[in-house]
Image: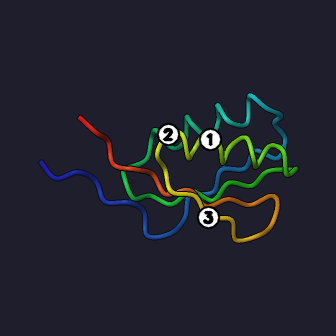
Amino acid sequence: MASPSPPSHPVTCDVRALACPFAVLEVKRQVAALPPGAVVEVLSADAWTALDVEVWARRAGHGVERPNATTVLLLVRRPVVP
């Protein structure tokens, strides 16, 4: 059975109303529900929350880009390792 393909557009995860650790937990929950290769646009209210999400994502092995200097992150979900 083929694995599901990632969505053709980024999935938005808006955590602007959440503080850490709840923002990281929400991003983690949404990323876990997506197939490998999916791109998640994370919107945060402040630079510290964005940094916490970035640190979690890198430690989990996901790709991370910062198209703006502070509050937006693009995560690329890593493949699931059996």
Tell me which amino acid carries mark 3: Glu
Q: CA distance from mark 2 to mark 1?
A: 12 Å
Of the residues under marks 3 and 2, which one precedes in the sequence?
2
Q: CA distance from mark 3 to mark 2?
A: 15 Å
Q: CA distance from mark 1 to mark 3?
A: 15 Å
Judged left or right of residue 58, residue 82 is left
Residue 52 drawn at (x, y percent) = 73, 40
Specify the quadrant of the image occupied by residue 20: top right
Q: How many marks?
A: 3
Identify which residue, 49 or 11, lies in the foreground: 49
Q: Quadrant of the C terminus?
A: top left
* Residue at numbered disc 1: 27
Numbered mark located on residue 65 in the image: 3
Of the residues under marks 2 and 1, which one precedes in the sequence?
1
Asked if 33 appears above or below 71 in the picture, the reply is above
Q: Nearer the viewer, mark 1 or mark 3?
A: 3
Identify which residue, 6 or 76, lies in the foreground: 76
Identify which residue, 64 or 13, lies in the foreground: 64
Numbered mark located on residue 16 in the image: none
Tell me which amino acid carries mark 2: Ala
Numbered mark located on residue 60 in the image: 2
Residue 46 drawn at (x, y percent) = 88, 50
Name which residue lies at 61% across and 61% down: 74
Q: Are marks 2 and 1 in contact (CB under 8 Å)?
A: no
Name which residue lies at 73% across and 36% down: 23
